[in-house]
Image (cartoon, rainbow, N blue to C red):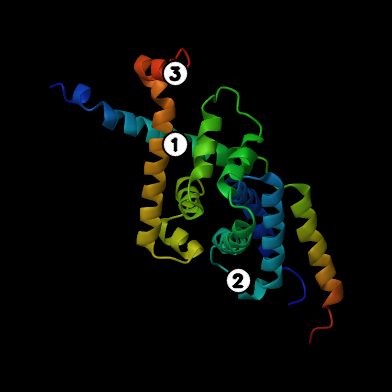
C-alpha cells in the first residue's frame, strides 16, 4: 500500500472535527489539542494497515489520540503540578458564548475533574459513543466507564450547584456571612 | 402531595444534570461546527502524495 485509500482519507477527514472537539475539551488548550490531533493523524497514517476497513474510524482515531494524551499527561504531571488549574485557565480563553453566563463556570468545573472522569464524560455525553465503544477507546471495562461517568456527573453537579445556588434560591444568609466578614 | 416541595434537592439535581449535559454538548458541538481546519486537510493531502513518491518502490 503506497497511497492512502481515498475512502480512508475521507473517513479520517470526516472524523477530524469531532476528534478536535474531543482533544480540546480533554486538554483545555486549543493549540495543544491541535498538536495532539496532528500527531494522532500522523500516527494513524503510519499505522493505517492496522485499521480494519469497515470498523469505526472515529473510534480508532480517538483511541490513538487518547493514548497520546495520556502518556503526555503523565509526563506533564511530573513537571506541572497544577495541571487542572491550567486547564480551567486555558478553557477560559476560548470564545465566550453570548447568553451563556454560566458557561465559564462549567468549563472550570470540567477542568477540575480527574482526566479519566473527564474523558469518559465527554465520550459518552458529547461524542455520542456507546459505553462499549468508550470502554474500548479507554482500554478499560464497560463498568469502569459507567462509574467514571457517574462520578463525573455527581462531582460536576456538586460543584455547579454550589455555584448556582444563588440563582435558584435566596442565599442571603450565606451571602451575608461571606460579605459580612469584613466589618469586624 | 407535597412531595415535590419536600425534595428540592432532587429537582435541583435533575436541573443541574440537564444543564451539565447541555453545556457539555454546546462546548463540544461548537468546536465540531468549526469543521476541518486547513492544517489537517493539507496534512492528509500532502502525506498522500509524499507517501506515493517516497514509498513507491515498496515491492
Label 2 and label 1 in one chain: no
Question: How far apart are the alpha carbons under marks 2 and 1?
Answer: 34 Å
Q: Secondary structure at mark 1?
A: helix
Question: Residue A89 versus residue A176: which sits nearer the camera?
Answer: A176
Question: Residue B8 versus residue A42: which sits nearer the camera?
Answer: B8
Specify the quadrant that holds the C terminus of chain A.
top left
Label 3 and label 2 in one chain: yes
The residue to which callout 3 is attached is A181
Please provide percent x and percent y for residue B14. Answer: 33, 33
Question: How far apart are the alpha carbons under marks 1 and 3?
Answer: 32 Å
The residue to which callout 2 is attached is A51
The answer to whether A26 is drawn above or below residue A132 in the figure is above
- Residue A43: name its quadrant: bottom right
In the visual, does B16 lie left or right of A73? Answer: left
Label 1 and label 3 in one chain: no
The answer to whether A82 is drawn above or below residue A53 in the figure is above
Question: How far apart are the alpha carbons under marks 3 and 2?
Answer: 62 Å
Specify the quadrant that holds the N terminus of chain A.
bottom right
Q: Residue furthest bottom?
A: B59
Q: Residue furthest front?
A: A184
Label 2 crowd (10 A; few <14 / some 14-19 / many >=20): some
Question: Residue B45 versus residue A29: which sits nearer the camera?
Answer: A29
Instruction: Say which residue appears at 66% left-offset and 64% top-offset.
Output: A8
Amino acid at each position: 500500500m503506497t497511497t492512502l485509500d481515498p475512502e480512508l482519507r475521507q473517513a479520517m477527514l470526516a472524523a477530524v472535527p469531532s476528534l478536535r472537539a474531543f482533544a480540546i475539551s480533554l486538554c483545555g488548550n486549543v493549540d495543544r489539542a491541535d498538536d495532539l490531533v496532528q500527531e494522532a493523524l500522523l500516527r494513524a497514517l503510519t499505522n493505517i494497515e492496522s485499521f480494519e476497513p469497515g470498523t469505526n474510524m472515529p473510534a480508532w482515531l480517538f483511541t490513538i489520540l487518547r493514548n497520546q494524551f495520556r502518556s503526555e499527561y503523565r509526563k506533564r504531571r511530573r513537571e506541572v503540578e497544577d495541571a487542572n488549574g491550567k486547564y480551567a485557565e486555558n478553557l477560559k480563553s476560548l470564545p465566550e458564548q453570548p447568553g451563556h453566563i454560566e458557561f465559564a463556570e462549567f468549563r472550570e468545573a470540567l477542568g477540575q475533574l480527574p482526566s479519566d472522569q473527564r474523558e469518559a464524560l465527554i465520550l459518552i455525553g458529547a461524542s455520542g459513543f456507546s459505553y462499549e465503544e468508550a470502554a474500548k477507546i479507554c482500554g478499560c471495562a464497560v463498568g469502569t466507564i459507567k462509574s467514571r461517568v457517574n462520578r463525573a456527573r455527581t462531582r460536576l453537579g456538586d460543584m455547579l450547584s454550589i455555584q448556582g445556588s444563588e440563582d435558584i434560591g435566596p442565599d442571603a444568609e450565606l451571602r451575608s456571612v461571606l460579605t459580612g466578614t469584613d466589618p469586624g | 402531595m407535597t412531595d415535590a416541595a419536600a425534595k428540592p434537592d432532587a429537582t435541583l439535581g435533575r436541573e443541574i444534570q440537564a444543564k451539565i449535559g447541555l453545556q457539555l454538548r454546546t462546548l463540544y458541538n461548537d468546536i465540531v461546527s468549526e469543521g476541518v481546519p486547513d492544517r489537517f486537510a493539507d496534512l492528509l493531502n500532502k502525506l498522500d502524495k509524499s507517501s506515493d513518491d517516497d514509498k513507491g518502490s515498496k515491492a
